[in-house]
Every structure is written in structure tokens, then in C-alpha cells.
Amino acid sequence: MFAAHGLTVRVSDPRPDLPEAVAEALAAFGPHLAGQGLDTEGLADRVHLTTDVTEAVRDVDIVQENGPGRVEFKLAVLSALEDNRRNENQLKNLNKKEN
């Protein structure tokens, strides 16, 4: 969705079939995104893959974390984000609870 809005996206996952899984997802969802009037030309070119969480979060504007619900994993992602963020605002709403 972010890539279809023209943003560069980094996908980080240790799974060995990451390139295939992302290619399948783009092929499956691309037509739906195009049907919504979003720009899917060059969609795959805006999606970059890495197995390194630190590389994935370095200097980003937005992090959408969808990893497993394991505390160790969440702490590693948040630590990488903390170490590689550009400014305080990137984490300001992280602990905000919604009513």
C-alpha cells in the first residue's frame, strides 16, 4: 500500500523465501491497488528487501511492524529503530494508548 502511494518500502524478514513471497504478494495485490486508482507502475522497484532489521529501519519515515508477538523480537526491532531514527518525533506516539 505504501509503495502504491509512491513511497519507497523496505521489507525485512528472515524467511528464506522472502523474494518469492513479496513477488507473489505484489502480483496478487497489484491489480487491486490499480483498481483503486493507485500507481502500480514500477511497484516492485519501490520495494526493497533485506533480512537485516537495522538496515530496514535506518533513516525511515514510517515503520509498520508486523513481526511475531515475541517479546525478544519486538525489543530487537524497537532497539534498532531507536538506534537508527532521525529524530524524536519518530517514536513519540509509539506508546500512546488509544481509547
Image (spheres, grey):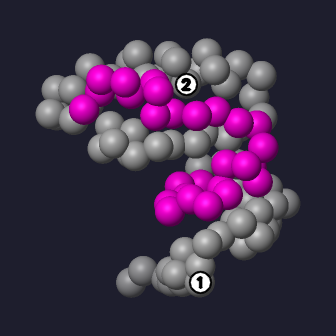
| Helix, strand or loop at mark 1 | helix
The amino acid type of the residue labelled 1 equals Glu
**Residue at point 75%, 28% (across, down):** 15
**Residue at point 73%, 49% (across, down):** 55
Report the disc number at residue 22.
Answer: 2
The amino acid type of the residue labelled 2 equals Val
Q: Farthest residue toward the right?
A: 72
Residue holding disc 1: 88
Quadrant of residue 2 in the image?
A: top left
Q: Position of residue 78 (x, y in %)?
A: 72, 67
Q: Nearer the viewer, residue 44 or 71?
A: 44
| Helix, strand or loop at mark 2 | helix
Q: Position of residue 34 (x, y in %)?
A: 21, 26
Is 60 displayed left or right of 41 in the figure? right
Q: Position of residue 44 (x, y in %)?
A: 45, 25
From where the camera sits, is residue 89 visible?
yes
Disc 2 from disc 1: Cα separation: 31 Å
Quadrant of residue 48 in the image?
A: top right
Is 59 displayed left or right of 14 in the figure? left
Report the disc number at residue 73.
Answer: none
Vertical placement of residue 87 versus 6, above or below: below
- Indicate which disc, 2 or 1, sits on the residue closer to the N terminus: 2
Mark 1: few, some, or many residues within 10 Å (few <14, many ≥20)?
few
Q: Which residues are magenta?
A: 39-65
